[in-house]
């Protein structure tokens, strides 16, 4: 608000203040003409101005609350009072105006002063203007008037004032809002006292706002939403409260906020900053109390020159404050403003702190002005302020623990702001923080170290855990920041601060650092086992990704158990490359293993073990699997059991003693039960053996007991299987005392060796797969029986005898038989059932029988073993043996008697009822039977009889040679049949087939039938069939023919025979009907008997005819007729059908073609004949034609693929299209025009729809030109017009297909039309319409096209083309480039230069022109410069309107770029000559910044010398034009003029003016001294006293003759000088201390007095300030006013004060010394208390009695006088404002 009740007064106080009511009445009378009988002429304008400002300034109705709070902050408060602002809403109608609710505003400030009342009764006359540097925060100027948004009649009660205002126009003056009206009702005071509290005094100021009904709820909501942080940056108000009181006066508190006093203030003089803590508390009835403390940082920054603005011209320093909340900010569910301008705005920054500064706000106070250089300058300093505040927070807490520092970093702004300017502040803060030493580092000591974020590294959380555990246990961990990188404090290095650390660029240390730290801090040594394992787990978990490529390979990290029991350390690299591999035992018996390893195996095991302590700790470690897996995978550690260790050792055994020791080591493990049986077995199978020669044998197949304690030596002699790794144990195994310490006995160890090392003996010995030399010669009975016992033992154990071993026994001649020593495989054990046969010597072969007497009958007990060895026991075996011996004789050596003996033996066996099958099977397959074809097997031989007569004619059969064997062999037919000889035919056709021979000459019918039977019944007759196919042996009606040439006629396909000249049919009369039963056999030999076979032959016949062009018309028709006949039965041969489909047998207009490439003429083809050359079938009667009869076979032709009509001929039409690319559907000769033009396209589209290849159809149709409304076009240049297009175009507006020409059927082919390139989609036609755009000349059509382009956001590819139509009449005009157009030329200056589109087109197209063609909205600055240049060149007279428009545009677009362009173009500027505007060179005209000089030169110069100013411009006043002109080089007259000097007449005519009448008075000198004492001028008191010291003694001389002064200016373009002379009223000779005045005659009028005052002020200012010419104009104004008031009275006192000027004590002393006789006059003009005391000091120090009479001008003077009386005893008379004496 602008009333600022207790702001220091700046208005003059000519007299004592009027009583409040009289003051109000005076305002009503003097300002608003109330009671004067006349109306204020400005009443209506004032009313409308206030009304407009009140309703338009703010976007929210209730923003006036901010004005009230702002005003309360600007008020002055009595000392000892806590400034408070209270809002109370009550339902009581206090003002009795009918309001349902009233808002009361209580403020305990000093109260309204008269000047404040004056202020709120005006518009924009705030008492705070220009006082931003005095801590005033209001500035909007609307102030108190904003309350009218919620109240129609606001009331003010303050300091005796009881007034109200009304938004309605006053009936007495016609003005609303600002007309005060006195309030008489005393009940209001009583009601206020009752509401506020009877026991409390009412505050000095109360504002009563009867609320409008529609604003009550909004008002309550806004009051309840009063932000708790609203007091944060207010320096005075300490409390704001909001209450609601109903009719019963029951108060319900809505919200209350209080702020504590500042604490812990700290000032930093080096950076102009201070800090303190504020405590805010908010109390609400619903949520209770809330508290929050805010750390406030306040810093000053100098205002940058480039950021200065008019509204803050008096401010030299920015004050930036930042508030950092400690804890939850007070918001009470409201938003959290991020930017304050003393009061909160609605800007949300997403920063965790608040920014406060003197920002320039938008009119609604919702946000700051983002484009303001003032605001940008403030925001530029926010990062510096934040950094200083942050550094103070971080480093000021020197004694605080380190864990207290990280929470400070929550103030770092991490979240991005939606406002780019604010976000740039965030990034600047980040950049500054990155370069500052703010990050606490870990030192493992109380010492604090801070580094830059880029110099600090984070550690893995797991590693922190290791370090922290070690420190907690008291382990001395050296400083971890001493390894090349500063480490972030562990209190900060956690996931809670990931976002902050990431924002500041704090990353993790590289993994090389961990290796340095572990080695440098010796962590592996100092850490206890459990934490040591944590360290290993950390390394293991990060090895693959991080450590694998670092120095961690070479860090001594792995603990090892040394040979002497000491713990040593090795690196991963050493563990991987050392000879001794790191191992860890997983069993409990580590001591035993380490003992034996140390004693016997250390040199061969190459094993290093983890210490026992590490081993035990690892068993309980929760991450054991991770550590072990890493050790195994990357350290190459082996996790061994005792068994695995033993395997490692056993693999390295090479020496005898090591082998013996290891065997006893295993024995010890077995004996102590340290290892399970299966492990013992495994190790014993791997351990080498020391043999009887002392050699170490690594591999063996079997282990033999020493010979001295075995059985095998008697049977085998010396071990025969040494080469097969059968090893005999050495005797050294039995002497084991040095290994077992005397506890192992020979028998126990021997049992161990037998059980686990598999040492064995006969018969338990398993032989190898090798020879057995002992079996190759006769064995004694004992050894033979021992061998049989050994084999029997092996069989009983299911041991498979090795083949070589078994074969040696089976084939060895060691078994005694009846014919001598034989192999078991050749021996027989006699059987009682059939033994008598051989004893009777019936057989003709000797059989070897085992000599049982030799073996004492014991051999029979080993029958199973003998059977295994191949000894035979069965009769069948004997028969096979006999047969084998029979067959071993040469066939040529077998006589007929041998044959007959064999047959006789078979007959004997049959008679004995013994089966001869085994004998027969052994000899049946031998070729020993002599036949006519040589020796054959019995099964291949035939005994001849009469049955074989006919077969012998057609086959060559092997008959038994009767001549060789004699006729007696015929008596053994049954025996021969048993042997397999064919004795009877028995339908044995296969024999005939196998021995078939082609007959010579003709074949009888019987033979033919026999051949067919062979084909039917024989299992395989392929050779027979093959032979019969080629021979002409079948009798036909055309003679003997080969089967393939012979037909067996069938009535089913009888019609096909007509296609062949001669068909050889089988002669059924020769063969009889029997042959018909062999139809399938005849077909096998290729007799044509089936329809398929007949068709193949006929097809070949037809192809032959086709190749010779011998197919006649009759054959074609007959073929189609047969196709028709057989197709109905569905029996037409496929191969003939294939011939008809694939062969070119139909003659067409294009030659011979296959049916699918032919068309049968039909009337449906006529529409397409003009564009297609169709292959119609030749229906002529020529040799190649078919005749008209062909049309009767339309159905059959269609089935064959012939296109019989257009509906079925799409594809053939496609292949026949012959469209010329220039085809325009012209009318062919002899065809109906409607068919050729209308139906052809529709027919083609229909065929395209039916075709399987629509895209190929489309390619052909695209070559056709289609009729459109714009003529014939190719398809890609056409559009199909429908309802969607009609909303944009008329039918004639584009290349739309002529639907009226083609008929509506064309609309049904949208898919096909789109495929050929026709545009259908309304959104896809922009490019096509653009191509046709320039073919139109009607503006309405072109406008429709533009609107269409706009709707679909079309843009041209080449903006430089002529795209815009400028009409000239209805159907004429021209196309122009977009660059030659503008949308608007409101000034009308560019009608010649540009085409102005708003003259031709409606405004809905302007956006399209701007976006698509980039047509400029209006001419640019450059265009105006070019225009002005053209005006300069033409030198014609300018119209004022044109010139005004030009400069109006320049002024509204004035900036640096405009200035540069204009200065390079403008060489002449406008001047006014005889009411006409002409252009003159800038060097010859001037800016009239001194109107007196302008008036002077205008009077006496013949040519115009001053620039012309446009009138009625809206942008600004002449000041802006002066800037523009001066930038163009136009000089100011005040700077260009040269003052030649004053001319003084005869001095004898001068008259000295008496001193009492002189102008140089105390008042005159007081004004000058007050001006020079301005601190901003920095003029010392001695200097200013020296400057004015000549004035008191200056003589004033009156001149009768005039004083003249000469002025001249130089016109630079011509070099001419213009001089004028003027009469002056004053001339001051400063050095001579004389002031010449021209004597005046009579009384001076107002104008003359004003002129005189001006001349005097200028002359005196120029004389005094000749060294500071920049101050002359300011002093001139002061002296001019002083001259007019005669330098006397209260005016002289007020005048310096109105310019914020004052006298200092030394200046008062100077005045008193200069005018000693006029002391009272001097002091009468000084009302300051200080000056009164100065006066008393100067005049009353001599205890003189002086009567002092003062005219008091201010209430404070009374107090000053009382103080004077108190300190001095002189009698004093004080004359008050009412002429009363005190």
Image (spheres, rainbow, N blue to C red):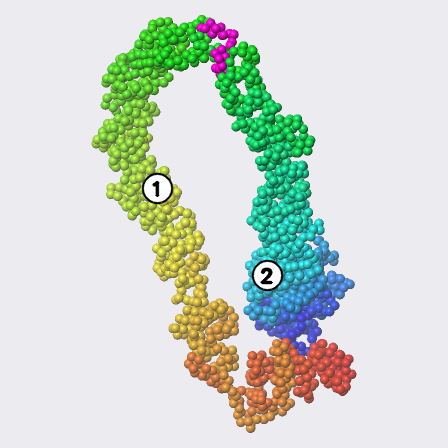
Horizontally, is 539 left or right of 1036 in the view? right
What kind of element bears circle 1?
helix
| Residue at the spot of label 2 | 435
Toward the left, the furthest residue is 1182
Residue occupying image coordinates x 61% and y 66%: 358
Q: State the residue in front, 1369 or 855.
A: 855
Q: Residues within 10 Å of mark 1 (few under 14, many from 20)?
A: some
Q: State the residue in front, 633 or 296.
A: 633
Q: Could you tell me if residue 459 is visible in this image?
A: no
Residue occupying image coordinates x 43% and y 75%: 1468
Quadrant assignment, res 1142: top left
Mark 1 or mark 2, whichever is nearer to me: 2
Q: State the residue in front, 206 or 130.
A: 130
Residue 1593 in the image: state x and y as whole percent. Answer: 62, 89
Q: Could you tell me if residue 1704 is visible in this image?
A: yes
Residue occupying image coordinates x 60% and y 26%: 706
Please, is residue 189 above or below residue 1237 in the view? Answer: below
| Residue at the spot of label 1 | 1256
What kind of element bears circle 2?
loop
Residue 1673 in the image: state x and y as whole percent. Answer: 56, 80
Residue 1590 in the image: state x and y as whole percent. Answer: 61, 87
Q: Mark 1–mark 2 contact, CB under 8 Å?
A: no
Q: Residues within 10 Å of mark 2 (few under 14, many from 20)?
A: some
Mark found first going from the N terminus, 1 or 2: 2
Quadrant assignment, res 308: bottom right
Horizontally, is 172 left or right of 202 in the view? left
Quadrant in the picture for the N terminus: bottom right
The stretch of residues the image draws in magenta is 817-842
Q: Is residue 1289 a member of the stretch shown in magenta?
A: no
């Amino acid at each position: 608000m602008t009333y600022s009740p207790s702001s220091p007064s700046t208005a003059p106080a000519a007299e004592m203040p009027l009583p409040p009511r009289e003051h109000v009445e005076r305002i009503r009378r003097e300002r608003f003409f109330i009671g004067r009988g006349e109306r204020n002429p400005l009443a209506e304008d004032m009313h409308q101005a206030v009304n407009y400002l009140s309703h338009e300034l703010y976007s929210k109705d209730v923003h006036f609350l901010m004005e009230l709070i702002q005003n309360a902050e600007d008020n002055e408060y009595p000392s000892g009072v806590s400034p408070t602002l209270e809002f109370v809403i009550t339902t009581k109608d206090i003002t009795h105006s009918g309001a349902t609710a009233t808002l009361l505003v209580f403020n305990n400030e000093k109260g309204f002063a008269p000047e404040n009342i004056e202020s709120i009764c005006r518009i924009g006359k705030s008492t705070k203007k220009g006082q931003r540097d005095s801590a005033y925060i209001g500035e909007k100027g609307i102030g108190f008037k904003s309350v009218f948004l919620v109240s129609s009649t606001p009331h003010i009660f303050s300091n005796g004032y009881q007034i109200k205002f009304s938004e309605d126009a006053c009936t007495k003056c016609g003005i609303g809002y600002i007309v005060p009206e006195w309030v008489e009702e005393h009940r209001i005071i009583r009601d206020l006292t009752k509401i506020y509290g009877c026991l409390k005094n009412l505050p000095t100021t109360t504002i009563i706002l009867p609320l409008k009904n529609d604003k009550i709820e909004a008002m309550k909501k806004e009051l309840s939403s009063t932000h708790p942080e609203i007091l944060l940056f207010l320096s005075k108000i300490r409390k704001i409260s909001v209450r609601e009181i109903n009719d019963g006066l029951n108060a319900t508190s809505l919200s209350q906020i209080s702020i504590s006093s500042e604490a812990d203030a700290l000032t930093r003089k080096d950076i102009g900053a201070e800090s303190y803590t504020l405590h805010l508390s908010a109390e609400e009835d619903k949520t209770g109390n809330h508290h929050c403390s805010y750390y406030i940082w306040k810093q000053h920054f100098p205002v940058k020159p480039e950021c200065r603005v008019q509204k803050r011209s008096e401010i030299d320093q920015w004050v930036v404050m930042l508030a950092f909340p400690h804890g939850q900010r007070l918001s009470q569910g409201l938003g959290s403003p991020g930017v304050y301008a003393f009061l909160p705005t609605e800007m949300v920054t997403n920063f965790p702190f608040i920014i406060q500064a003197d920002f320039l706000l938008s009119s609604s106070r919702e946000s700051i002005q983002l484009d303001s250089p003032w605001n940008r300058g403030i925001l530029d300093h926010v990062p510096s302020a934040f950094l200083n505040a942050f550094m103070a927070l971080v480093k000021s807490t020197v004694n605080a623990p380190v864990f207290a520092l990280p929470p400070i970093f929550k103030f770092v702004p991490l979240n991005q702001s939606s406002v780019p300017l604010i976000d740039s502040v965030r990034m600047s803060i980040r950049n500054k923080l990155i370069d500052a030493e703010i990050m606490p580092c870990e030192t493992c000591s109380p010492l604090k170290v801070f580094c830059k974020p880029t110099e600090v590294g984070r550690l893995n959380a797991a590693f922190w855990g290791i370090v922290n555990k070690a420190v907690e246990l008291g382990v001395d961990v050296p400083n971890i920041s001493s390894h090349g990188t500063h480490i972030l404090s562990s209190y900060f290095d956690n996931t809670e601060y990931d976002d902050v650390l990431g924002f500041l660029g704090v990353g993790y240390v590289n993994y090389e650092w961990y290796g340095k730290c572990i080695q440098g801090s010796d962590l592996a040594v100092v850490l206890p086992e459990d934490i040591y394992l944590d360290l290993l787990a950390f390394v293991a978990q990060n090895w693959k990704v991080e450590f694998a490529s670092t120095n961690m390979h070479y860090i001594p990290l792995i603990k090892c158990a040394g040979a002497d029991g000491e713990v040593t350390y090795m690196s991963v690299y050493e563990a991987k490359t050392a000879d001794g591999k790191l191992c860890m035992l997983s069993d409990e018996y580590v001591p035993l293993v380490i003992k034996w390893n140390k004693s016997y195996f250390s040199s061969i095991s190459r094993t290093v073990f983890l210490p026992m302590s590490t081993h035990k700790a690892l068993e309980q470690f929760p991450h054991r699997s991770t550590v072990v897996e890493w050790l195994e995978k990357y350290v190459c550690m082996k996790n061994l059991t005792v068994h695995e260790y033993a395997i490692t050792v056993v693999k390295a055994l090479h020496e005898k003693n090591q082998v013996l020791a290891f065997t006893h080591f295993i024995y010890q493990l077995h004996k102590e039960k340290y290892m399970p049986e299966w492990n013992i077995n495994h190790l014993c199978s791997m351990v080498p053996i020391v043999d009887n020669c002392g050699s170490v044998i690594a591999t063996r197949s079997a282990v033999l007991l020493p010979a001295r304690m075995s059985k095998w030596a008697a049977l085998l002699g010396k071990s025969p299987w040494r080469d097969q790794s059968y090893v005999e144990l050495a005797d050294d195994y039995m002497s084991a005392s040095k290994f077992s310490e005397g506890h192992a006995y020979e028998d126990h160890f021997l049992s161990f060796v037998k059980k686990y090392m598999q040492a064995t003996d006969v018969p338990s010995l398993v032989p190898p797969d090798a020879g057995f030399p002992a079996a190759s010669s006769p064995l004694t009975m004992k050894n033979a029986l021992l061998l049989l016992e050994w084999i029997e033992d092996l069989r009983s154990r299911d041991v498979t005898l090795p083949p070589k071993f078994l074969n040696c026994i089976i084939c060895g001649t060691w078994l005694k038989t009846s014919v001598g020593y034989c192999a078991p495989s050749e021996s027989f054990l006699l059987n009682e059932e059939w033994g008598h046969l051989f004893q009777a010597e019936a057989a003709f072969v000797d059989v070897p029988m085992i000599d049982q007497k030799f073996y004492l009958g014991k051999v029979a007990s080993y029958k199973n073993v003998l059977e295994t060895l191949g000894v035979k026991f069965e009769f069948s075996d004997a028969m096979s043996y006999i047969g084998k011996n029979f067959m071993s004789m040469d066939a040529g050596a077998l006589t007929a008697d041998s044959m007959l003996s064999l047959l006789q033996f078979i007959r004997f066996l049959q008679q004995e009822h013994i089966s001869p099958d085994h004998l027969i099977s052994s000899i049946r397959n031998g070729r020993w039977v002599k036949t006519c074809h040589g020796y054959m097997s019995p099964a291949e031989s035939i005994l001849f009889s009469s049955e074989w007569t006919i077969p012998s004619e057609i086959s060559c059969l092997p008959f038994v040679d009767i001549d060789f064997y004699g006729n007696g062999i015929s008596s053994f037919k049954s025996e021969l049949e048993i042997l397999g000889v064919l004795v009877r035919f028995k339908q044995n056709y296969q024999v005939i087939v196998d021995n078939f021979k082609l007959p010579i000459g003709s074949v009888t019918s019987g033979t033919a039938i026999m051949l067919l039977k062979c084909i039917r019944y024989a299992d395989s007759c392929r050779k027979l069939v093959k032979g019969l196919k080629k021979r002409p042996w079948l009798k036909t009606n055309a003679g003997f023919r080969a089967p393939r040439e012979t037909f067996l006629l069938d009535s089913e396909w009888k019609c096909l025979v007509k296609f062949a000249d001669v068909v050889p049919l089988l002669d059924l009369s020769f063969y009889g009907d029997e042959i018909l039963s062999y139809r399938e056999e005849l077909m096998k030999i290729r007799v044509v008997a089936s329809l398929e076979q007949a068709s193949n032959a006929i097809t070949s016949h037809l192809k032959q005819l086709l190749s010779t062009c011998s197919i006649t018309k009759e054959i074609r028709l007959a073929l189609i007729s047969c196709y028709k006949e057989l197709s109905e039965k569905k029996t037409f041969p496929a191969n003939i059908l294939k011939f008809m489909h694939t062969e070119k047998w139909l003659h067409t207009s294009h030659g011979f073609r296959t049916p699918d490439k032919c068309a049968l003429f039909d009337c449906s083809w006529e529409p397409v004949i003009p564009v297609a050359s169709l292959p119609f079938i030749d229906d002529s009667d020529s040799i190649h034609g078919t005749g008209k009869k062909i049309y009767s076979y339309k159905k059959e032709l269609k089935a064959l693929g012939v296109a019989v009509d257009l509906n079925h001929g799409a594809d053939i039409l496609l292949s026949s299209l012959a469209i010329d690319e220039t085809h325009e559907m012209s009318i062919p000769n002899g065809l109906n025009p409607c068919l050729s033009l209308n139906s052809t396209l529709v027919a083609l589209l229909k065929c395209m729809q039916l075709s399987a290849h629509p895209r190929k159809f489309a390619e052909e149709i695209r070559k056709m030109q289609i009729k459109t409304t714009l003529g014939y076009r190719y398809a890609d240049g056409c559009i199909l017009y429908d309802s969607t297009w009609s909303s944009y175009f008329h039918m004639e507006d584009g290349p739309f297909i002529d639907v009226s020409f083609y008929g509506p059927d064309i609309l049904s082919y949208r898919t096909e039309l789109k495929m050929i390139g026709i545009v259908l989609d309304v959104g896809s036609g922009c490019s096509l319409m653009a191509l046709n755009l320039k073919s139109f000349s009607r503006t309405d059509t072109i406008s429709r096209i533009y609107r269409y382009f706009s709707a679909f956001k079309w843009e041209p590819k080449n903006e430089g083309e002529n795209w815009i139509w400028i009409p000239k009449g209805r159907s004429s005009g021209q196309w122009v480039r977009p660059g030659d157009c503008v949308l608007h030329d409101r000034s009308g200056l560019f009608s010649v230069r540009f085409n102005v589109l708003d003259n031709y087109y409606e405004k809905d197209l302007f956006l399209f022109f701007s976006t698509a063609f980039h047509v400029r909205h209006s001419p640019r600055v450059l265009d105006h410069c070019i225009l002005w240049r053209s005006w300069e060149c033409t030198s014609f007279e300018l119209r004022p309107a044109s010139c005004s428009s030009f400069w109006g545009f320049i002024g509204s677009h004035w900036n640096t770029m405009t200035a540069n362009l204009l200065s390079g173009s403008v060489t002449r500027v406008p001047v006014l000559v005889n009411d006409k505007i002409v252009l003159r060179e800038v060097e010859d005209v001037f800016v009239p910044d001194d109107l007196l000089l302008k008036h002077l030169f205008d009077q006496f110069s013949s040519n115009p010398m001053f620039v012309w100013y446009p009138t009625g411009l809206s942008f600004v006043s002449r000041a802006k034009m002066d800037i523009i002109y001066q930038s163009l080089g136009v000089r100011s007259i005040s700077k260009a003029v040269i003052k030649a000097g004053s001319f003084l007449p005869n001095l004898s005519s001068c008259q000295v003016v008496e001193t009492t009448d002189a102008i140089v008075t105390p008042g005159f000198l007081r004004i000058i001294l007050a001006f020079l004492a301005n601190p901003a001028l920095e003029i010392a008191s001695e200097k200013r006293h020296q400057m004015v010291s000549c004035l008191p003694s200056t003589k004033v001389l009156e001149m009768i003759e005039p004083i003249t002064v000469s002025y001249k200016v130089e016109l630079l373009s011509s070099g001419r000088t213009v001089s004028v002379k003027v009469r002056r009223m004053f001339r001051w000779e400063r050095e001579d201390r004389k002031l010449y005045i021209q004597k005046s005659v009579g009384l001076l009028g107002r104008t003359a007095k004003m002129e005189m005052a001006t001349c005097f002020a200028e002359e005196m200012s120029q004389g005094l300030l000749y060294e500071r010419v920049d101050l002359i104009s300011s002093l001139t104004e002061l002296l001019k006013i002083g001259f007019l008031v005669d330098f006397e009275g209260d005016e002289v006192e007020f005048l310096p004060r109105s310019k914020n000027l004052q006298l200092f004590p030394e200046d008062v002393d100077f005045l008193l010394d200069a005018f000693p006789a006029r002391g009272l006059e001097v002091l009468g003009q000084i009302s300051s208390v200080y000056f009164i005391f100065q006066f008393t000091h100067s005049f009353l120090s001599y205890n003189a009695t002086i009567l002092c009479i003062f005219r008091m001008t201010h209430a404070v003077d009374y107090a000053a006088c009382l103080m004077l009386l108190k300190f001095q005893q002189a009698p004093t008379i004080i004359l008050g404002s009412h002429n009363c004496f005190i």
